[in-house]
Image (cartoon, rainbow, N blue to C red):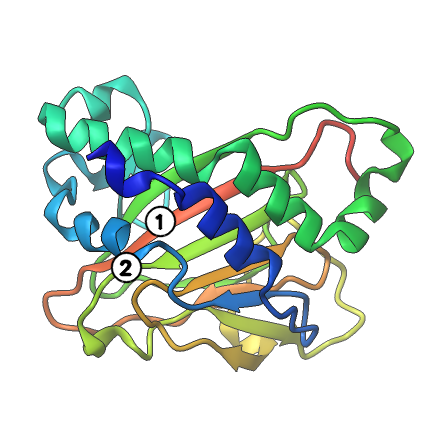
Amino acid sequence: MQNIFLGAKKYISEQIEFSKIINTPCEYSIIDNFLPEKVFNEIDLNWPSEVMVPIPETGRTKKYSERKVMLFQSKFLNGLDQFKRNFWILMLNTLISTEVIDACYNKFKNTLDKRISHLGKIGNISSEMLIVSDKNNYSIGPHTDSRSRFISLLLYLSKDSKYQNSGTCFYQPRDITMPVQHLKHHKFDDFNLSKKIKYIPNRLVIFPRTDASYHGVESININDCDRRLIIINIKAPEGAK
């Protein structure tokens, strides 16, 4: 099992490094074939459906019961057989490795440094990873993410083409004077859709959290929906603007 991850950190870091930054309506990159093929092909075989629960049951939010998750906590990992548990721990140690997190930071360094330049030297940047399955009727309105967020990575996993129109959307507020409410999930009617990214398996969407990073997911209406993702949240250093 461990052999398929050999060289994965370098491969993933280079994928991030050489990706193109898109600047409208906010900064983001789209990276296809993000994971090495051998790693990506193991995901379905090791999918942890037996331990996934609606996200409100984790205490992270009271909403979005259509989103099921596995967190990297002992109560989830201990419910997996040893083979699956080892796979996901290796995946975690790869995707939130120092090499990959550094590549993410360096990708958007000019933007991110505006939030932390007043701090002087900063230490290690913390991060978390979630395994996600969105069910029918899941949606989340335009939001920038909390200011506690630094960078977001959304990795699409489901191979069925029926999910292709359920990708991440980027928005712009219709009222350009609307103040930023970084903890609020807004109504779709108050925003213009600027870009809808096609959901393609092994495609990564990565963007820094800014006051312009309004994103969301339009309501998903798919029979037997199992819209799979890996989400990585890189957290802002304490004191970031």
Q: Is residue 151 above or below residue 121?
A: below
Helix or strand or loop: what does disc 1 sit on? strand
Residue ID at (39%, 45%): 8
Between the C-alphas of marks 2 and 1, the distance is 7 Å
Q: Is residue 160 above or below residue 192?
A: above
Residue 22 point in image, percent of width and height: 65, 73
Q: Amino acid at mark 2?
A: Leu
Q: Give the label on residue 230, or none.
A: 1
| Label 1 crowd (10 A; few <14 / some 14-19 / many >=20) | some
Q: Amino acid at mark 1?
A: Ile
Name which quarter of the figure residue 55 lies in.
Answer: top left
Residue ID at (75%, 67%): 178
Q: How many marks?
A: 2
Residue matched to label 2: 157
Mark closest to the chain's N terminus, 2 or 1? 2
Q: Give the label on residue 15, or none.
A: none
Q: Nearer the viewer, residue 82 or 185?
A: 82
Residue 199 point in image, percent of width and height: 35, 72
Residue 183 point in image, percent of width and height: 60, 47
| Label 2 crowd (10 A; few <14 / some 14-19 / many >=20) | many
Q: Nearer the viewer, residue 99 or 153?
A: 99
Residue 78 point in image, percent of width and height: 17, 19
Residue ID at (67%, 66%): 27
Quarter of the picture containing the C terminus is: top right
Helix or strand or loop: what does disc 2 sit on? loop
Q: Is residue 179 above or below residue 86?
A: below
- Residue 66 visible (yes or no): no
Q: Is there CB contact under 8 Å for labels 2 and 1?
A: yes
* In this picture, residue 121 sits left or right of residue 236: right
Quarter of the picture containing the N terminus is: top left
